[in-house]
Amino acid sequence: MATLVSFHAHPDDESISAAGIVRRAADQGHRVVLVFGTRGEMGEVQDGFLADGEPLWQRRVAETLASAEILGAARVEFLPYIDSGMMGEPSNEDPACFWQAPVEDAARQLADLLVQESADVLTVYDDNGGYGHPDHIQVHRVGVRAAELAGTARVYQLTSNREHMLRGFDMFQAQAAAAGIELPDVSSAPAEMGKPESEITAAFDVSDLVETKRASMRAHASQIADNSFFLTMPDEAFGYVFGTEWAIRDGQGPGITETDPMAGL
């Protein structure tokens, strides 16, 4: 059996982008390790959610451990950086934030873990971090360099499929309106979200694990409330959006050439 290391920016990112492949790998008997660049200190939380004096990062770490158990992860690690906030915010300039971390320094820390784990597979994000968040972009930069340092050959850049996303919004717009659910504006999605379908080389069918993904999201209650857009989606729409996890691997393609990140391992 093999080892999959899934590298993310903040707690809850693993639930949204990789819960299916992580749980599948664990079910296949592979070792799964979750690594986070930050503890999500800049996340938004509803008033009264935290106990008096409770720091948000502490709650988010606890939520991550609960999610990891749901996903079958054997180990969870956090790099020593703080959340950078959204692109353009003053928090981007904090010298302690992940966005400001020298790529080589952060990559060496991740590479040491990859070597320690004898990692066969690493997941990161695409070069725009999926949607332009600085910490997500940094996951790409740090993760790709760490794989080079550690000699981890199989690196998947998790992304979203722009055309698939837009087709889904068209399909479910009427359903959402009937259910009183307001869909987010996706008019700018082609420019900012994910990658064109033509650039994607891997489609991982995790449709049988969507309830696991939903449970993992629920574990992150500070960020994904029961009344959130994700958790109030009708089952059919949720399955469409989260039933496939998409990725790019250098040297693959054109088109979809992989359907299992652990194939042959």
Image (cartoon, rainbow, N blue to C red):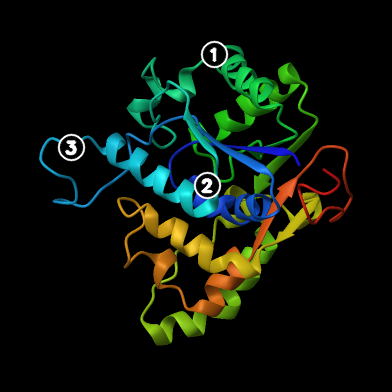
In this rendering, the answer to whether 139 lies above or below 186 is: above
Residue drawn at 57 percent across, 56 percent down: 189
User: What is the secondary structure assignment of the residue under circle 2?
Assistant: helix
Mark on residue 178? none
Residue farthest to the left? Answer: 52
How packed mark 2 is, by other alpha carbons closer than 10 Å (few <14, some 14-19, many 20 or more), is many
Residue drawn at 44 percent across, 70 percent down: 183
Q: In front here: 67 or 42?
A: 67
Answer whether residue 160 is visible to the viewer in this image: no
**How far across and how far down the image is residue 134, in percent?**
50, 32
Residue drawn at 38 percent across, 20 percent down: 93
Distance Cα–Cα, label 1 vs label 2: 23 Å
Distance Cα–Cα, label 2 vs label 3: 23 Å
- Label 2 with label 3: CB-CB less than 8 Å: no
In this rendering, the answer to whether 103 lies above or below 84 is: above
Question: First in sequence: mark 2 or mark 3?
Answer: 2
Q: Is residue 217 left or right of residue 258?
A: left
How packed mark 3 is, by other alpha carbons closer than 10 Å (few <14, some 14-19, many 20 or more), is few
Looking at the picture, which amino acid does disc 2 mark? Glu
Marks 1 and 2: which is nearer the front? 2
Mark on residue 54? 3
User: What is the secondary structure assignment of the residue under circle 3?
Assistant: loop
Residue drawn at 36 percent across, 19 percent down: 94
Quadrant housing the C terminus:
top right
Marks 1 and 3: which is nearer the front? 3
Residue farthest to the bottom? Answer: 178
Q: Is residue 75 left or right of residue 90?
A: right
**How far across and how far down the image is residue 220, in percent?**
37, 52
Answer whether residue 27 is visible to the viewer in this image: yes
Looking at the picture, which amino acid does disc 3 mark? Glu
Q: What residue did someone put label 2 on?
A: 14
